[in-house]
Amino acid sequence: MDGRPFLGPRKASERTYVYLHCDRMDGQYDMVRGVRDKRFKYFRNYHPERPNIQDITYRLQMPRVRELLELHQHGSLGPNWRPCRRRRIRPWLFLRPVPSAN
């Protein structure tokens, strides 16, 4: 893969599609592939049995993360945080809002 400048006088033209991948998160394997354009984002999770926020040693040392997990255990998280501990669905497709002309 080759990088392209995205700032400055040699800034490259905008890409039609951007591809992504993730193979591991700290010590855990977590294979995700994705692609996006101006309108859609699509993610394919190859480990849907894992939660969105995984139990990673480094992350679990952070006080804020420990607090969130404790709130989750007590059912005190608001509706925006609850999906973070659920298992992921295999394909995710997001429709991105189209920027206004203003």
Image (tube, rainbow, N blue to C red):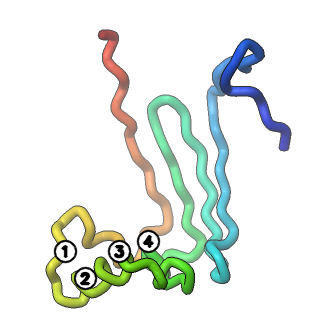
Please indicate whether residue 75 sits to the left or right of residue 27 in the image.
left
Q: 10 Å neighbourhood of mark 2: few (<14), some, or many (≥20)?
A: some
Q: Residue 101: x, y in percent? A: 33, 11
Label 2 and label 1: CA atoms lie apart by: 5 Å
Residue at 30 percent across and 10 percent down: it is: 102
Label 1's element? loop
Mark closest to the chain's N terminus, 4 or 3: 4
Please state which amino acid type lies under the numbered disc 1.
Leu
Image position, residue 72 (x, y; %) = 25, 82
Circles 4 and 3: CB atoms closer than 8 Å = no
Q: Nearer the viewer, mark 2 or mark 4?
A: 2
Q: Secondary structure at mark 4?
A: loop
Q: Which residue is mark 2?
A: 72
Give the residue displayed 49% in from the left and 29% down from the top.
Answer: 38
Q: Earlier in the sequence, mark 1 or mark 3?
A: 3
Kind of residue sitting beneath label 3:
Arg
Label at residue 52:
4
Foreground of the two, 101 or 60:
60
> In this rendering, would 18 be left or right of 65?
right
Q: Which mark is residue 77?
A: 1
Q: Local crowd at mark 4 within 10 Å, few (<14), some, or many (≥20)?
A: some
> Judging from the image, what secondary structure is the residue with disc 3 in?
helix
Question: Looking at the image, which is closer to me, 60 or 1?
Answer: 60
> Are circles 2 and 1 on residues that touch, CB within 8 Å?
yes
Does 58 sit left or right of 53 as displayed?
A: right
**Residue 80: where, in percent of width, then height?**
23, 62
- Residue position for label 3: 64
x then y, percent, for residue 28 = 64, 81
